[in-house]
Image (cartoon, rainbow, N blue to C red):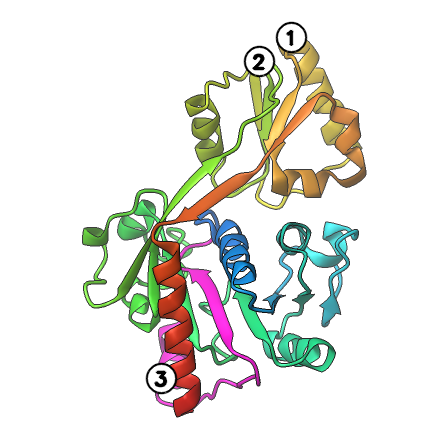
Amino acid sequence: MRARNALYDRKRLRARRLNGPVVSVGNLSAGGSGKTPFVMLLGELLKSRGVKFDVLSRGYGRESRGVLLLDPGGLPQQFGDEPLLIARRLQVPVIVGEDRYEAGRFAEAKFGAQFHLLDDGFQHRGLARDFDIVLVTPQDASDRLLPAGRLREPLTALRRADAVVLASGASEESFAIQEKTVWRVKRGIVAQGVPMRPVVFCGIARPQNFLLQLRAANVEPAAQAFYRDHHAYNEKDVRELLELKQRSEAGGFVTTEKDAVNLGPYLSALAPMAVVPVRMELVDAANAVDTMLRKIEERRRGA
């Protein structure tokens, strides 16, 4: 990774540029920092400003290949669970593709040179970006590089960021970001209509955080079942969850929005069930978006 970054920094490898502005949202660690909720938050803020945009995503976990325009009614096997969630929440075009530059070219051919939100793009240096946003968590400050830990890059990679987002209670003192634009987000869940003593289940990067958030919202689970991140549910999983509900005398189920996407046609088999959305709030959002749009305009004028 260090050698690859050095080749880009020294212009030996060149990033390709789209006609429209590119805003990347990424992180340092493998999963669980809140990239998807932040993309949706930033998308909602841009929509409130009347800014037209699309989302470019790799489509992690999909079985298809190449560049595809996402169908919000499609399946995670075809497009990936998180891109589907983004498309359904934001109601904007989402294009998946291993090569995000080609995905962007496809988007511009179809929708014009509008804003592009690059999902999970910090390490995807083959596509030039006009603004780089990186989320960090408290765990990142003391973590180790893969495979010993979860970090994709060392903390020094934050030098490339335009804005560092402190997520999940991360503190500025833990990271060498004194000269960086720092944004803070508050993250929580909306636990409404949750059955009494539910079975909590999910396939996300940090399931214990979800459990803690539920307990903070006075939801006390009767049982729990955790799966690997991006888990694709099947009939066996549903049967085992129903058996767990019966054994624990639970009143129903509660899970995340991403898991609801991955349940697909099995969703109705687990009624009664509450699907709990994650909500993110950006502190001083208006000023943050103003700063981002101003820097993008300055850079594009100077390009």
Please indicate whether residue 248 sits to the left or right of residue 110 in the image: left
Quarter of the image with the C terminus in it: bottom left
Please indicate whether residue 91 sits to the left or right of residue 48 in the image: right
Q: Residue at x 67, y 80 (%)?
A: 112
Which of the two discs, 2 and 3, sits closer to the camera?
A: 2
Q: Residue 8: tell me if it is visible.
A: no
Tally of marks = 3
Residue picked out by circle 1: 249
Q: Are marks 3 and 1 in contact (CB under 8 Å)?
A: no
Q: Position of residue 23 (x, y in %)?
A: 48, 70
- Residue nearer the viewer, 299 or 73: 299
Q: Position of residue 12 (x, y in %)?
A: 42, 91
Structural crowding at the residue carrying mark 1, measured as other residues with C-alpha within 10 Å and reported as few (<14), some (14–19) or many (≥20): some
Which of the two discs, 2 and 1, sits closer to the camera?
A: 2
Up the image or down, 6 lies above or below 23; here it is below
Residue picked out by circle 3: 9
Q: Residue at x 76, y 41 (%)?
A: 264
Q: Are marks 2 and 1 in contact (CB under 8 Å)?
A: yes
Q: Residue 265: tell me if it is visible.
A: yes
Amino acid at pointer 3? Asp
Residue picked out by circle 2: 197
Q: Position of residue 124 (x, y in %)?
A: 50, 72
Structural crowding at the residue carrying mark 2, measured as other residues with C-alpha within 10 Å and reported as few (<14), some (14–19) or many (≥20): some
Q: Position of residue 253 (x, y in %)?
A: 65, 22
Amino acid at pointer 2? Arg
Amino acid at pointer 1? Glu
